[in-house]
Amino acid sequence: MAHSSIPPQPKAPTPPVPTSADVARRAGVSRATVSYVLNNAEAVRISEPTRRRVREAAEELGYVPHAAARSLRAGHTRIVLLPTSHVPAGPLYSTFLDELQRALRRLDYTVVQYGSLGLGGDEAARAWAELRPVAVISLGEITLSAHHVATLRRAGARAVITMGPETVPGAHALVMDQREVGARAAAHLVERGRPRIGVVVPREEGMGLFSAPRLAGARSVPGAWVEPLPLACSEESAAALAARWRSLRLDGVFAYNDEYAMLLMRALQDEGLRIPEDVAVVGADDLLVGRLLRPRLSTVRIEMPTGDHLAALVDHAVREPGEVTERHGLMRAEAVHREST
């Protein structure tokens, strides 16, 4: 049986990658002008019509600046490395991170989120350094040392910024003292004649970064008698705690945050306990949904730094790197009295 063969069709040639020279010819300007416009250089005055012409030419050609070449010219990248969180991020924290990323983007930085789950301090510092970031914002879940900061600086990081309860030599420190949250909640309960206080300690892995200092803050309040209450974020765990609540002889609870407070409050009510008559309940974060509950949830309102504020700090540290680092206390907390207490 005869077989006919179909000759292979020639492949279409790959179109050349457009360059800044192509953009310059299309826009009728110099390559330097193209670089100034597409890199958002503010020090050079270029008219708006020229900027628009360059951007239109780049879009028509499909030109995208080469990040590596740009880094070589500048002597550093524009990458701000943000290790991903190991713990569940609540709405308050998520909103802050979204604001931060938008603010950094407006300042022409590229935010790279790095999955650091399972990495220790040495491994994390080396892994981050491989990307040659111009800045690293460590959220405090990986313990960094002065040695780790030095590793990142040798790799080109002009700024290392830590967020958490402790400072790290060589890094800018945004000190967010979670003890104040627990202290405000416990003091609120003591002032209302509820000195025997249960403090929810989430069972979820990694939550100790926030829950341990909040527990310590509650214990620091004069007149408070504090009982730690391990609780998983599940209906079953909340129901089990509520079932033995009467035997605990507690008259108030600081439930770590609003989400755990709502979970526990529902379980306590299912168990026939009245809120606040039998148990006063306080959360933290001041979420809108807490105001929609009945009774409305008392809480601790936390004032976080704005994304714009932290982005400006990063930009300043990148532009003016030096040996001098700063310590910024950025978190304040206040109790908000509602019906649940």
Image (cartoon, rainbow, N blue to C red):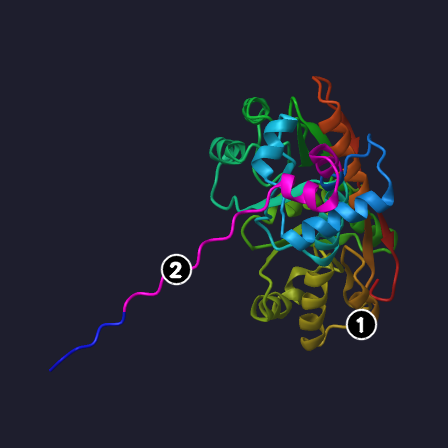
Viewer-side residue, 20 vs 25:
25
Query: Mark 1 or mark 2, which is nearer the start of the sequence?
Result: 2
Quadrant in which residue 315 is drawn: top right
Determine the residue located farthest toward the bottom in the rendered image: 1
Q: Is residue 34 magenta?
A: yes
In this image, 15 relative to 271: left or right? left
Residue located beneath label 2 in the image: 11
Crowd band around label 2 with a 10 angstrom C-alpha radius: few (<14), some (14–19), many (20+): few
Mark 2 or 1: the one toward you:
2
Residue type indicated by callout 1:
Leu
User: Which residue is at 82% across, 68% downward?
Assistant: 277
SS for callout 2: loop
Span shown in magenta: 7-36
User: Which residue is at 13% across, 80% downward?
Assistant: 2
Is residue 52 something one can see in this rendering? yes
User: Which residue is at 27% across, 72% downward?
Assistant: 6
Q: Picture coordinates of residue 30 (x, y %)? A: 72, 35
Residue located beneath label 1 in the image: 293
Crowd band around label 1 with a 10 angstrom C-alpha radius: few (<14), some (14–19), many (20+): some
Total marks in image: 2
Residue type indicated by callout 2:
Lys
In this image, 44 relative to 6: left or right? right
- Which quadrant is home to the N terminus? bottom left
Whole-number angstrom distance, CA of label 2 to CA of label 1: 65 Å
